[in-house]
Image: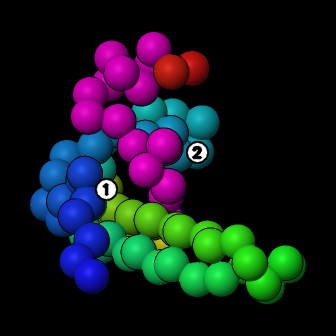
Amino acid sequence: MKKVFDISVGDQVWLMHGNAAVCAIVTKAFYTKFTSNLDYESTVESELYYVSVNDKPLYESFKKEQLFPSKADLIKSL
């Protein structure tokens, strides 16, 4: 199986960090799919992204829903 990401490594994204809108570059994309350990029947998928701001990595991951292609899209989501 091959996973195709909507956001690629090297893409510029906007996100909220420290109560401020920041522009970041995606440095890593992570995907996993597993069976839930709560009911052992549901399948859980997780897509996470790691970013850097001004060439400094943020040591937290972000979900796709937290990343926006433009500052205007980020502000509209608030």
How far is disc 2 from disc 1 in space, using C-alphas? 12 Å
Side of 12 where 40 appears, left or right: right
Mark 1, Cα crowd under 10 Å, few <14 / some 14-19 / many 20+, is few
| Secondary structure of residue under mark 2 | loop
Visible in this render: residue 22? no
**Amino acid on which disc 2 is placed:** Gly
**Amino acid on which disc 1 is placed:** Val
Residue extending farthest to the front is 41
Residue extending farthest to the right is 38
Residue 32 on image: x %, y %? 47, 79
Q: Give the mark, 2 or 1, whose residue is nearer the N terminus.
A: 2
| Secondary structure of residue under mark 1 | strand
Residue 58 on image: x %, y %? 44, 65
Residue 43 on image: x %, y %? 62, 73
Q: Which residues are magenta?
A: 60-76
- Which label is found at residue 15? none
Side of 66 where 36 appears, left or right: right
* Quadrant hosting residue 51: bottom left
Q: Quadrant of the C terminus?
A: top right
- Which label is found at residue 18? 2
x 44%, y 33%: residue = 21
- Cβ–Cβ below 8 Å for labels 2 and 1? no
Image position of 71 with respect to 59: above or below: above
Between 49 and 2, the one nearer to me in the picture: 2
Residue extending farthest to the left is 10
x 53%, y 68%: residue = 45
* Quadrant hosting residue 27: bottom left
Q: Which residue is mark 1?
A: 53
* Membership of 23 in magenta stretch: no
